[in-house]
Amino acid sequence: MTLLARHGDSARVVAGGTDLLVEYSKGRCRAPILVDVTRIPQLNRLDLTDGRLVIGAAVTHARLATSELLSRAAPLLSQAAWQIGSPQVRNRGTIGGSLGTASPSGDCLPPLAALDAEVEIAGPDGRRLLPLAQFMLGPKRTALREGDLIVAVRCLPLPPGAGSAYLKFGLRQGRSIAVASAAVIVGLSDGRVDLARIALGAVSPRIGRAEAAERSLLGQPAGVLAWAAAAQLAAESAVPISDVRGTAGYRRHLARVLVERRPGAGRGGGRAGRARRGASLHPRRGAGRASIAAGPAPPRRRDLCRERPLRPLARRREPVPAARAA
């Protein structure tokens, strides 16, 4: 904190650096001083304290994906962490970096929103807690002030007996940015929904909850009709954009499909045992094709929709020396 206060705008915090190094390479960041926070013990904690999960800002995505505590207390967060980038990115990238980047397509952010997460921030004026909805102001915009540091994120564990799932639609099987994603938590009592939390990703400028959809489920039998109505309300709450990965209409359709798959009905399920595999859908796999066929067609970009296998390089023949040939 002293270094950040001393150097001001000339310093940037670095942990994994997976986003920051890209900013440097593209000339978006020119700060001459980097403050490494990876060895601060408080930023590496991952535990359950006073009934809330506390995840330090320097905890890597790989650690989230393999944590036994998260597999029991927040399996949808483990599902999301397994779908971030490649093994190299998961081993370097941190949850604090995902929060600081504040990308609407970030995989860990919808599960955190569904878990009622709060961001703990340390600054020149002391520490404060901000709900995730107040922390994220828009794409790459947060409530951080000069000299602030993300310390941890605190969230509620999954209630006993509740089901959860994180579903993501990408244009390929692995290392894909979400075209749309959804994190869902549902609890039942006597066959009726008594707990519903739905958070959408990549379909609005900021991560938020589909509150109208949640209210529509409460007190309803956990049947197909109730979820179909809730999925439609969730899609109507989305404010998507059109870009190279999909049109606004396509994203809104995907939001409805992903919510309608609900915990236990889709491939992701709600069981902690499946958290390590996650549930990622894409237009080249049958699991996604059946549900998406009725909606708008995905964007036809050959370089995004399929990967061509690399041809092996031809082996170069070396000339045979004359003496050896004789």
Image (tube, grey):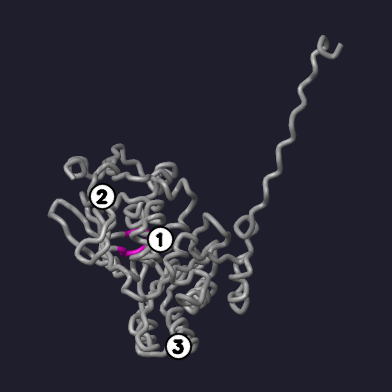
Mark 2 Cα-neighbour bin, 10 Å: few <14, some 14–19, many ≥20: many
Q: Position of residue 97 (x, y in %)?
A: 34, 52
2 or 3: tag closer to the N-terminus = 2
The tally of labels here is 3
Q: Residue at x 30, y 39 (%)?
A: 34
For badge 1, the amino acid type reads Ser
Is label 1 in a helix, a strand or a loop?
helix
* Residue found at the far right of this picture: 326
2 or 1: tag closer to the N-terminus = 2
Q: What range is drawn magenta here?
A: 136-141
| Tag nearer the camera, 2 or 1 | 1
For badge 2, the amino acid type reads Leu
- Residue 226 is marked as 3
Residue nearer the viewer, 52 or 318: 52
Q: Quadrant of the C terminus?
A: top right
CA distance separating discs 3 and 1: 27 Å
- Residue 43 is marked as 2
Q: Position of residue 222 (x, y in %)?
A: 43, 86
